[in-house]
Structure formats: C-alpha cells, structure tokens
Image (tube, grey):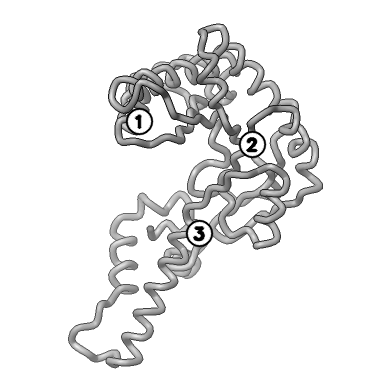
Amino acid sequence: MAHAAVLIEEYVKAGYRKIHLDTSMFCADDKRDRSKTLADEIVASRTLKLCQVAENTWKKYISPVPELIYIIGTEVPVPGGAREKEETVYPTKAEDAAATLAVSKKHFLDAGMFDAWDRVSGLVVQPGVEFGDDQVFNYRREKAKALSNKILEYKNLVYEAHSTDYQSETGLKALVEDHFSILKVGPWLTFAYREALFALEAMELEILGKNHADLSKLGYTLERVMVKEPRYWKSYYHGDENEKFFKRKYSFSDRSR
C-alpha cells in the first residue's frame, strides 16, 4: 500500500485528473487465502486511503480546490488480455456491482469524504467482453441487460469497461448505449501500429528490393529480439513452434509491443 500511495501521489502531481483506484489485488504481506478475492470491506478501506492521498496531493501541489474524478472497481479482465483459452465470459452480476458501490460509499461518507464521493464518476465492471491471443468475445447486450439497467439507479455514474479491444463498431456503439461509457483499449492500438509498420516494411522491399544494403529488417529484428527475451510473451502464446512463430507477429494480445 505504501508503494501504491506513492504511485497515486506521482500521478496526481503530474496533473492526471481521472484516477482509477483499484485495490483489489493482494499486497505482499497479506496473509489471506489468495485463491479467493479480497473482501469488499478491505478493498473499500484501501480505496478510501488512496483517495485521501490523491485529494491531499492535489491540494498541496495543484490547487486548493480538488478537481479529481475517480473510477473505482477491480480491473477486469486482467490487463493485456486473457492468457488462457476461455469458453465464455460472464458479465458482472448487477448485485455485485451494487454491493461494491454500497460498501465504498459507506467508507467514504463515514470518513467525511462527501465531496470526493460525489466525484466518483465510474465503476469498472465486466460487460462480457474479452480477447485472447487468437479469440475475441463480442459484446452481447442481452447478457448484460441487468447490469446495464442497474447503473440507472445512481446519479452521475457510468460504467468503465476494460479490454474492449477488437470489438466491432456495432458492439462499441451498443456498449455506450448500455452505459458502458468509458471504453479502454490497449493492444488494439498497438496491433494497428504494428500493422502499419509491417506495411511500410513491405513497401520498402517492393521499392528497394530485398538485396538493398540499407533495409530496416524490422520483421527479422522483432522476431530475433522476442525469441531472445521470451518473458514478455511466453505465458500468452501457446502451441507448437510454428504457431508461436505466427503469434509473435500477429497475435491479438500483441505482446510484440
């Protein structure tokens, strides 16, 4: 938690105004059963502590009037996409989302953090979307209907959805219509960037020829470095050597980034 407090402080000092307070992960000295999730009470208590750090930091370094907004809730799915093959992805239960909001609100108000709670603007939930290195789970709004409707009971709150990479335009539109108003992507962006770089390399070969002395050798270099340092991708890419060779370049997880 001490490290987390420093992290939050540095982000706020740098001028970031939208802060996601996620304390659902175990700390190094937690003695609890790690096969289970942390209790809501513990998560809410730690969320409050980090919020207090953020508020005090803003007042000290930026302005006497806090202008921070907060997102709460656990980071689901795991950042970077799934590491194992999945059969299906289930949306967060509406009652679980309500429980997270209720216990968090109680901790904030009991601590007198009324203004800060009013600036909690989003809750991270799982709307039923995910991607892995060779699969994408598209949004199915009928499965998330109860969750979608639940947020209408709260003033000034929306959902934040993570891992919305590779969703179709129709799916992204439906997510926003269903109050998943903040959509996070990562690998999708760098996947597109990698495609652009590979296209430029293909143009280079067409124009200069494969025997030119000053070729970038981008694809060759990327493969060589990834094979030399497998720790960034080996837990994501499975299969035989031919499959791994393909995935190091074209996987949706885009560990080449």
Mark 3 or mark 2: whose residue is earlier in sequence: 2
Please name which of the two marks, 3 or 1, marks the residue nearer to the observer.
1
* Towards the viewer: 91 or 241: 91
Label 2: which residue?
158
Q: At which x and y percent is residue 34?
A: 53, 23
Screen quadrant of the C terminus? bottom left
* The quarter of the displayed image where residue 206 is located: bottom left
- In the figure, is residue 10 to the left or right of 85? left
Secondary structure beneath dot 1 equals helix
Mark 3 or mark 1: whose residue is earlier in sequence: 1
Q: At which x and y percent is residue 209?
A: 29, 92
Q: At which x and y percent is residue 241?
A: 45, 66
The numbered mark at residue 12 is 1
* Towards the viewer: 165 or 216: 165
Which residue corresponds to the image point at 33% horizontal and 22% vertical from the top-left?
57
Q: Say which amino acid is labelled 1.
A: Val
Q: Are marks 3 and 1 in contact (CB under 8 Å)?
A: no
Q: Say which amino acid is labelled 3.
A: Trp
Query: Crowding near pointer 3: few (<14 within 10 Å), some, many (20+)?
Result: some
Mark 3–mark 1 distance (CA, rounded to whole Å):
27 Å
Which residue corresponds to the image point at 76% horizontal and 42% vertical from the top-left?
144
Query: Crowding near pointer 2: few (<14 within 10 Å), some, many (20+)?
Result: many
The vertical placement of 233 against 246, above or below, is: above
Secondary structure beneath dot 2 equals strand
The numbered mark at residue 170 is none
Q: At which x and y percent is residue 66?
A: 42, 24
